[in-house]
Amino acid sequence: MRTVEEHQRVVAGLIAAGTPTRLPIAGTLGLVLAEDIVAPLSLPGFDNSAMDGYAVYAEDVAAATEDAPVLLPVVEDIPAGRTDALTLIPGTAHRIMTGAPLPAGATAVVPVEATDGATETVAIRKPANAGQHLRHAGEDVTAGTTVLRAGATLTPAALGLAAALGLGELTVHPRRRVLVMSTGTELVAPGTPLQPGQIYESNAVMLAAAVVDAGGEVVASTMTGDDVDTFRDTLHRHAGTADLIITTGGVSAGAYEVVKDALGGEVEFVKVAMQPGMPQGAGRVGTTPIITLPGNPVSSLVSFEVFVRSALRAAMGVAQPDRPRRTAVLTEDLTSPRGKRQFRRGVYDPDRGEVTSYGPPASHHLRWLASANCLLEIGEDVTELAAGSEVRLWDLS
C-alpha cells in the first residue's frame, strides 16, 4: 500500500498555483498578496485635528483657567473635508472638527470639552501644550514605505490600510476553483422523502464547505448516481470551470464503483495505509487535476484534511498551509491496527494539555467528527497506547 506521505506528495504535485491576478480590493479578503504594497502617499496626508475643538496658538491660552478663561474670537469654522488653505492669526481661534485640516500656524487643539463651545467668541478654560491633539502628516505611513509584504494574508485591517492608501485593486494569488461531485444511486437531496434504502446526500455539502473553509471557491457541488455515462456527462459539463475536481464515493473494490469505472484510464486508484480513508485516487481529466475520495462521510472529510486541504492552501500562496500539529497526553488506553496510520476523532483540552478520543473509529460515525476539535494521529507501527502516553494531534479548532 502507498504511505500517507507518498499520497500527499502525489496530490500536492497535481494542485498547481494560479497566476497572480489583480482583483478589486472588495474581493480579496483572506487571499494572499503576490507582491509588496508600497505606499503611494503618506498617512495622514496632511496635518489634522485629533479632536473636535479649537485650533489655537498654544501660547495664547497658556494662562487659561476655569475661573479666568481666555476669550478668543472664532474667525473660521473647519469641518472635515474642507479643502481651502487657511492660516490662523495669533490671538484668534478656528473651530475645528476631528480629521479636519489644521490651519497653518496653529500649534495645538483645545478640545471642545475645555471650552464653552461658542461659535463667535470662545471661552477657553484650560491651557494647551504645543502639539496637543494634533496628527502630523506621515506619522502613520510615509510615502514610499513598504507597508505589506508579498505572502501576507489580507485581513480586514490590511484591506482598510490599502483602501486608505487609495488602492482599488491588489495583486493576489487567486482562489483555486473546485468542482465537488458526490456519487451514489442511494443519495437524494435534502427535502426529498426517503424511500427504503435511500440516504440524504451529505458529502458534497461537507466537502464544499471544507473547500470554502480552506479559502477555495466552489464552482459547483453536484450529485450523480452510479451510471457511468451520467457521471461523465456531469463531470465534463462542469470541469472546464474548475482548477480542481474532488469526487467522493465510487472508489472501493465492489461492484457499481462509478468513479473507478468511469475514470480507470485517467486516475490512478490506490490503497493508502491509513484508517479511515484507505481507497484513494488521483489523476487528471484532460488538464484538470482530480482527487477521488472514499464515500463514507468520515473517510471523505478525513481524507480531505490529510491530502487536499494543505495542498489547496499552498497553491493559493498561504505561508502556513497545514493545520497546527500539537502533542498532548492521552487520557485513556487506545488500540490501533498495525500497518495503518489511524486518524481518530478527539477532544483536546489545551489548558490541561490532554486529549481524549471521541466516538467509535468506524468511518460512518459522522456525529462524533462534527463535535471533535482534533484528529489523533497514531503511527503505522503502533498497536497500543496507554493512558498517560503522548500522542500527536491535528488541531481542527
Image: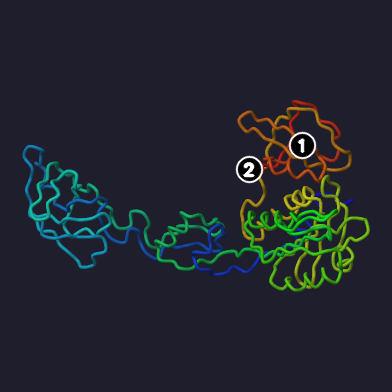
Taking 388 as reference, is 131 above or below it?
below
User: What residue does disc 2 label?
Assistant: 397
Q: Residue flagged by tag 1: what amino acid is it?
A: Gly
Taking 156 as reference, is 240 above or below it?
below
Q: Name the disc covering residue 251, or none.
A: none
Instruction: Please name the residue shown 77% across and 26% down the image.
Output: 387
Mark found first going from the N terminus, 2 or 1: 1
* Mark 2 crowd level (few <14, some 14–19, many ≥20, 10 Å Cα): few
The answer to whether marks 2 and 1 mark residues whose Cβ atoms lie closer than 8 Å is no
Instruction: Please name the residue shown 85% across and 72% down the image.
Output: 229
Task: Looking at the picture, tell me which residue is in the foreground, 130 or 323.
Answer: 323
Indicate the position of residue 347 as horizontal and vertical percent values. 69, 35
User: What residue does disc 1 label?
Assistant: 359
Q: Which secondary structure lies at badge 2?
A: loop
Asked which quadrant contains residue 355, the reply is: top right
Task: Looking at the picture, tell me which residue is in the foreground, 282 or 292.
Answer: 292
Left or right for 99, reference 219: left
Q: Residue flagged by tag 2: what amino acid is it?
A: Ser
Instruction: Please name the residue shown 82% across and 71% down the image.
Output: 232
Instruction: Please name the residue shown 84% across and 31% down the image.
Output: 384
Indicate the position of residue 290 as horizontal and vertical percent values. 78, 64
